[in-house]
Image (cartoon, rainbow, N blue to C red):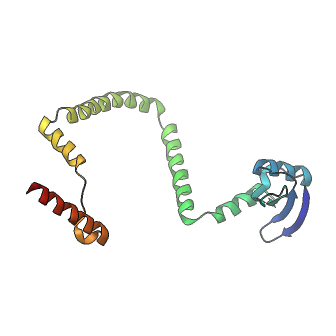
Amino acid sequence: MEIIKDSNNTLLKRQELIFEADNNVSFDEAKKQIANKTKKSEEVIDVYNVKGGFGNQKFIVKANIYNSKEDLEIMKNMELSKKQKKEKEEAQAKSEEEAKTATETPSEETTENAEQPSETNEESTTAEEKPDTAPVEERESEKVAEEKPVEAPMEDRPEEESKAIKEEEQKEEESKE
């Protein structure tokens, strides 16, 4: 492991490190090597790129070493997109709600939940029976509907395809006559 570039970024509270590895290393292996070399814990190290050239045995590894775990978490949250941030907030809110409901009278909930599954089981069995009890005519019409391919109007088709279909229709009419 040979360090190519080592710079300190005080604004982002991190040390930016680029080094060259002699063999292909995984992100976890790179973290361990950096931790051993810099005497920092693996929790504050973020390896974000391992790149190698075709046919080369040398790999470039880029990593950031943060001053604290909180700094690392702040930067990871900044990198998230709006959608990812929203999903993360929703997941946290959901887990908090589940924790609240679990702490509120767990003995009462277990008795209520014990009664509810039996009702849902009865409902699900009746729902399952309904498709089987449908008249034979309805089942056959469903099968026919599934078998028939849906043809697009002639205007929506490419010219070559519509010409081929017209020719086939003419041949069918001629063979019927």
Residue drawn where x is 31% and y is 32% of the image: 120
**Is residue 80 left or right of 108 when viewed as pictured?**
right
Task: Decide if residue 75 is on the left or right side of residue 17.
Answer: left
Whether 68 is drawn above or below 161: the answer is: above
How many marks on residues? 0
Task: Mark yes or no: residue 150 visible.
Answer: yes
Closer to the camera in the image, 58 or 45 = 58
Q: Is residue 103 above or below residue 80?
A: above
Residue 168 percent coordinates (x, y): 21, 61
Name the quarter where the C terminus is drawn: bottom left
Q: Residue at x 39, y 31 (%)?
A: 113
Compare residues 95 and 102 and report the one nearer the observer.
Answer: 95
Q: Where is residue 125 drawn, in percent x and y?
A: 27, 30
Where is 139 relative to 70, above or below?
above
Q: Where on the picture, by quarter, is residue 89?
A: bottom right
Question: Can see residue 158?
Answer: no
Q: Write the residue at 49% across / 46% down.
A: 97
User: Where is residue 75 drawn, in percent x and y?
Assistant: 70, 63
In the rendered view of the protein, which quadrant contains the N terminus? bottom right
Task: Report whether 115 appears left or right of 18.
Answer: left
Image position, residue 150 (x, y; %): 24, 57
Which quadrant of the structure image shows residue 72?
A: bottom right
* Residue in view at x 21 percent, y 42 percent: 143
Which residue is farthest left?
Answer: 177
Front residue of 18/150: it is 150
